Amino acid sequence: MTSLASETSAELKPEARPPAATDGPLYGSQRPRLLTLPGVSLSSAGQEAVDLAERAGLTLDSWQRFVLDKGMSERADGNWAAPEVCVNVPRQNGKGAVIEARVLWGLFIGGEKQILLSAHEFKTTHNTMKRIERLIEGCPDLRKRVKQFHKTVGREGIELHDGRELKYIARSRGSGRGFTADCVIFDECMILGDDAMSALAPTADAVDNSQLWYLGSAGIGHLSQQMARLRKRCLTSLESGVPDPVLAYMEWSINQHRAECVQGCTEHDDIDSVESLLRANPGVGYRLQVEKSMQRRLTMGDHLYARERLGVGEYPSDEADTWQVIGEDAWRSLAAADAHPEARHPDGSPIPGVVSFAIDMPPERSHAAIAVAGPWRGGTHVEVPEHRPGSSWVVERAKELHERWKPRCWVVDAGGPAGSLIPDLEDALGIKVVSPKTREIAQSCGQFYDAVIDQSLSHHDPAPLATALAGAQKRPLGEAWAWSRRGEGVDISPLVAVTFAKWGLLAEVEDDVDPLDNIF
């Protein structure tokens, strides 16, 4: 496997790198940030595809030639080194040209009897069809080998005189069934469901030397299940150093800063920098402009800009990857319908100073959670009384809970997204909010984990908390660990909140806020 480090743009031969000029146009990185290959190949058909595309009037960028070279590498026996190829690159960078070059090679040089091309929306496939037809029409040597351009609805494609075919397939549960393909190309693979995969992927199983090509942009959540599987295989390969035996994966993206990044972090990327735009977009300088591309951040906002232009995707995980830290069975076994904090007088009124509350929210601030913890039968009971969209409701609801329960403390991580609520909370509640230090965050996670293992924790099995646990994983924090999300779109704020609430039962609590403190 070629390592990621050896494939960065710094390692390119001079002729493969766009011209550098301080006063001229800027060019995007011609090599992917994430790259894994199945192994060392002896040859590649990629140059044949590049040369044929050139004859047809299609001049390819360096990054497009790189994709074809690596994706069409061959083993010693002449078979594909990578039977599966995935290209993950933001929109408008020119991935369509890669598809066109690969199709032309398969039809006119590679001897592939049948190529299937599909996209999420058939209009995308139709546009690709028109571009391929124009390339063929503009090259007499290719045009004379075409028997017919089929344009009848449901039978769209290209048929050569020798029987080779390119078929354009609408994506559905039954599309492609009954075909046998040498190559299947999935365009817009960030929207590729299991129904389409089960219908189209097996069409290549009966061909000795077949290929599946996946091309798309950053994942958009649950619709990106197949791309998530491919990406995970790449990351697993890079982390373990063991090459995936059949996959070539190439991704242009940035590694965006995370909520836990400290100021001055150099491991991750800023979404507002030109360097990030260039790293994620190989088409800058060819078909994308720096200023216009960066202005899209104003149009779309940070989240959409990061996804659509910088390749920061949302990738779901298969069910087998859930409950990584605490097993589902262990968690469910702690559910007790009659459990509640032992924090009430015989008349049912709350006992002041017995329970603690905590607040947390995810980095995108889409939701917020309020949790409570209190003693119960020698252990601790935790609940999530509130988990709602947004955060505008939090302070008022906290005030209501505070007046009723008079807890010993409220816990909020000052360095986390909910930290911005602390001044308003202290004003509304008249207390000093407890903010755990880094070592205390790690301690709180360890204490929560130990309580689950020791079965000294109870809960009512609220759905938000179970969902958070299913989607949580560990991140290193010094020599210990803290909670981390498995991926974008996973909200673990209920879990973080109950962890802090439990920790707050024994935390040191400062005196109430002096009203004069808020004047200065």
Image (cartoon, helix red, strand yellow):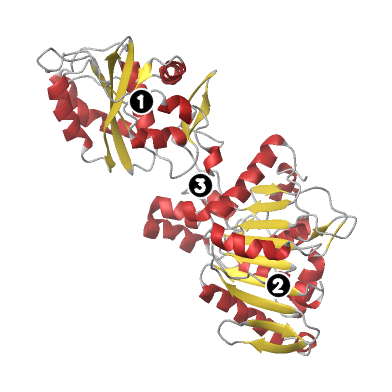
Q: Quadrant of residue 464?
A: top left
Query: Who comes first in sequence, dot 3 or dot 2?
Result: 2
Residue ranking furthest to the left: 347
Q: Which is more toward the observer, 376 or 397?
A: 376
Residue ranking furthest to the right: 76
Is disc 2 in contact with disc 1, using a CB cutoff of under 8 Å? no
Question: Residue 308: where, in percent of width, then height?
Answer: 48, 57
Quickly name the residue at label 3: 316
Question: Residue 453: where, in percent of width, then height?
Answer: 47, 17
Quickly name the residue at label 2: 115
Give me the residue at 51% from left, 28% from top.
Answer: 325
**Res. 447 in view:** yes
Q: Secondary structure at mark 1?
A: loop
Query: Who comes first in sequence, dot 2 or dot 1?
Result: 2
Q: Which is more toward the observer, 8 or 416?
A: 416
Give me the residue at 48% from left, 27% from top.
Answer: 326
Question: Residue 129: where, in percent of width, then height?
Answer: 62, 79
Q: Which numbered mark, 2 or 1, is in the foreground of this view? A: 1
Disc 1 residue type (three-letter): Ala
Q: Residues within 10 Å of mark 2 (few under 14, many from 20)?
A: many
Q: How many marks?
A: 3
Query: Who comes first in sequence, dot 3 or dot 1?
Result: 3
Q: Secondary structure at mark 3?
A: loop
Disc 3 residue type (three-letter): Pro
Left or right: 515 in relation to 413: left
Left or right: 86 in relation to 348: right
